[in-house]
Amino acid sequence: MKDYIRSVLDVVGESPFVPLEAHAKKGVLAVEKLAEAMEAYCAGNQAVLEERTIEIDKLEHDADKLKQKIRAGIPSSVKLPVDKKDLLSFLKQQDSIADFAQAAAYWMNLRPCKTLPEEIKNGFLELMGA
Amino acid sequence: MDLLVIALILAGLYMAWNIGANDLANAMGTSVGTGALSLKQVIIIAGVFEFLGAVFFGERVTSTIAKGIVPIDVIGSIHPDIVAIGMLAAILAAGFWVTLTTFYNLPVSTSHSIVGSVLGFGLITAYNGTIALSDIHWGELTKIVASWFISPALGAVVAYLTFSVIRKLFLHRAKDLPLVERKFISLQLITACYMAFAHGSNDVANAVGPLAAALRVMGVTGLEVPIWVLVMGGLGMVIGMATWGYKVVETIGSKITELTPTRGFSAEFATASVVLLHSYSSLPISTTHTLVGSVIGVGLAGGIAAVDLRVIWRIVSSWIATVPIAALTSALIFVGLEVIFL
């Protein structure tokens, strides 16, 4: 049965800050996977590298979907406590984190490098904080 | 007692039930949403203070509905039954419109419906030649309609200011933010009582205003609105809250989780103050619309993550539709009842 309710609920819109946090989390996970991918690359473990690359791909795709959802979820009728333009440009920057992780993972897949000098290898691992 | 009076009492009780089940529940829902009060506490507070507001402060708005819009004494001196039938038609029309729109979840106000349907009765008597069109108190009606625009805007302004002051004085200075919020929980207990009292004082008129008018011209009561009529309206609303309103309170409480105690306090304090001010000025306004205005005010002050302003257009369109539809339905029901009773 339909609820016999006449309510004030319409006034509260869906908060974009909840999916914004979820979007940031995708970026964090993608960077974590990239660190693992880097380790696999340096160890010459091609199978793990490919696996991580696919996982990063998926995370980047999820982040894109969340980005679309946030953008679509703030029509002009919704008022936020912060400037909408600021929120959108922040989202754009935040989204590029997962994009860069994806691109970096692809580069590593292009050519397995067996003769990587030890100091560059260490430099890469240090860079990833792994 | 007359058959008409009994029919009026029943229709008035139905309207009171409806107001308690939806309007009162909406007003109280925000207290549950903030986690300040339990459902049980809210129902008890709403029951007690709604009743007190209706009985001790409900007379002014009831008089406005009863005789502020249509000159019932003039019509009553020609034939008292015309007023009784007209008021029955008015309350049936308003009840019908409110029931219909509630099923479609439209933010229609009972106050607006009853004003529209009483006006419809006035117009049909003018059409019948019982009174002149200029006998309808257009000045008073203009004041009432103006208050429908002013009350939500005023709610927004008061809530904006209240929340801004709270933020400046407490939230920005607080070392322990959750502690400040907890302190506001007890304040919300007070605003919940205030809210129920204000609501009772303004909205009881929507249920018993027409009844008071009919009793007056039929000579059952004197010039004053009798206390038992207000008691009846108050009881009807409390029953509405207890039998259905708790569901509405639960739904609203579970969905408006954004309102923390400081924000809920601001919205409720603003709404109750504006509604009580209008009760004092004898103007029937919508508590729900004022509450929407107040929540928007808190939102504009930066208190809520996202406020959807589309709701404003939904409310404005409900105003534009309610008065003509309620007036027309009321006039049609009046014509039908006239054939049966006169």
Image: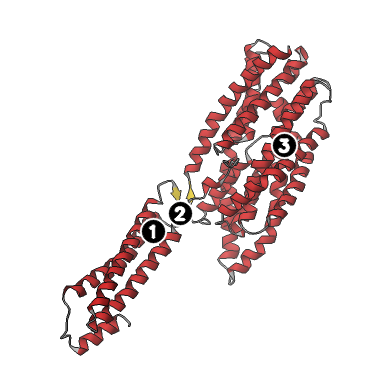
- With respect to residue B156, does B69 lie above or below? above
Query: Whole-percent x and y of residue B206?
Result: 69, 33
Quadrant occupied by the C terminus of chain B: top right
Q: Which residue is mark 2?
A: A80
Residue A93 is at least partly visible in this image:
no
Residue B230 is at least partly visible in this image:
yes
Residue B17 bears which disc, if any? none
Estimate the spatial distance between the alpha carbons at disc 1 and disc 3, rounded to whole Å. Answer: 46 Å
Query: Whole-percent x and y of residue B265?
Result: 63, 55
Q: Is residue B42 left or right of residue B101?
A: right
- With respect to residue A32, does A10 lie above or below? above
Q: Nearer the viewer, residue A98 or B312?
A: A98
Residue type, label 2: Leu
Estimate the spatial distance between the alpha carbons at disc 3 and disc 2, rounded to whole Å. Answer: 36 Å
Query: Whole-percent x and y of residue B100?
Result: 58, 32
Mark 1–mark 2 CB contact (< 8 Å)? yes
* x 56%, y 53%: residue: B256
Q: Is residue A122 left or right of residue B42?
A: left
In the rendered structure, which disc, 1 or 2, sits on the residue that comes first in sequence?
A: 2
At mark 1, the secondary structure is helix
* x 76%, y 23%: residue: B214
- With respect to residue B71, does A75 lie above or below? below
Q: Which residue is mark 1?
A: A87
**Within 10 Å of the Cα at label 1, are there few (<14), some (14-19), or many (20+) other Cα atoms?**
some
Q: Which residue is mark 3?
A: B204
**Residue A49 appears in which quarter of the rendering?**
bottom left
* x 67%, y 61%: residue: B185
At mark 3, the secondary structure is helix
Q: Are marks 1 and 3 on the same chain?
A: no
Query: Whole-percent x and y of residue B137?
Result: 66, 22
Q: Is residue B28 left or right of residue A115?
A: right
| Coloring basis for residues | secondary structure
